[in-house]
Amino acid sequence: ARWRIGQAILKRRSLSAKILDFLGERADDGDLGTLKLLRLENQLAASRSTAHAYGWTVRTIREDWARYCQASRDIAMQLNANMLLEKQLLCPILYRLAGEGR
């Protein structure tokens, strides 16, 4: 299960990076700061996720199941917060670009 979740997160992160690159080529100067912020947030999320995955081995999970569960919930909450931030910041850019026909 951990592997499948990790693969899904990697695919999502890769798609997000491609979207940000695509928009970066089309967005106006005012939006570039927003896209930069989202790239930074994605990098931070990737670092947290990687640290979580490598920090919890089968042995450490077995030894402290409750703490692992809490750490996993924290990562999931951070992922959800990151997706909400993307939605809040990207939707206005997408609507603007769609309206301009870029």
Image (cartoon, grey):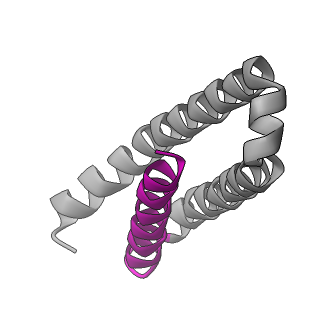
- Coordinates of residue 53 in the picture (x, y in percent): 70, 51
Residue in the picture at 30% in, 56% down? 94
- Coordinates of residue 12 in the picture (x, y in percent): 42, 58
14 versus 61 height, above or below = below
Q: Nearer the viewer, residue 94 or 60?
A: 60
Q: Give the range drawn in magenta.
A: 1-28
Residue lying furthest bottom: 25
What type of secondary structure mainly makes up the magenta span? helix
Q: Which of 53 and 59 is in front in this view?
A: 59
- Coordinates of residue 8 in the picture (x, y in percent): 41, 55
The image quadrant that residue 46 belongs to is bottom right
- Coordinates of residue 10 in the picture (x, y in percent): 49, 63
Residue lying furthest top: 66
Left or right: residue 89 versus residue 49 is left
Q: Which of 39 and 54 is in front in this view?
A: 54
Q: Can residue 1 be seen in this view?
A: yes
Q: Is residue 27 visible?
A: no
Residue in the picture at 65% in, 31% down? 72
| Residue 19 sits inside the magenta stretch | yes
| Residue 12 sits inside the magenta stretch | yes
The image quadrant that residue 98 belongs to is bottom left
Residue in the picture at 27% in, 63% down? 97
Left or right: residue 61 versus residue 1 is right
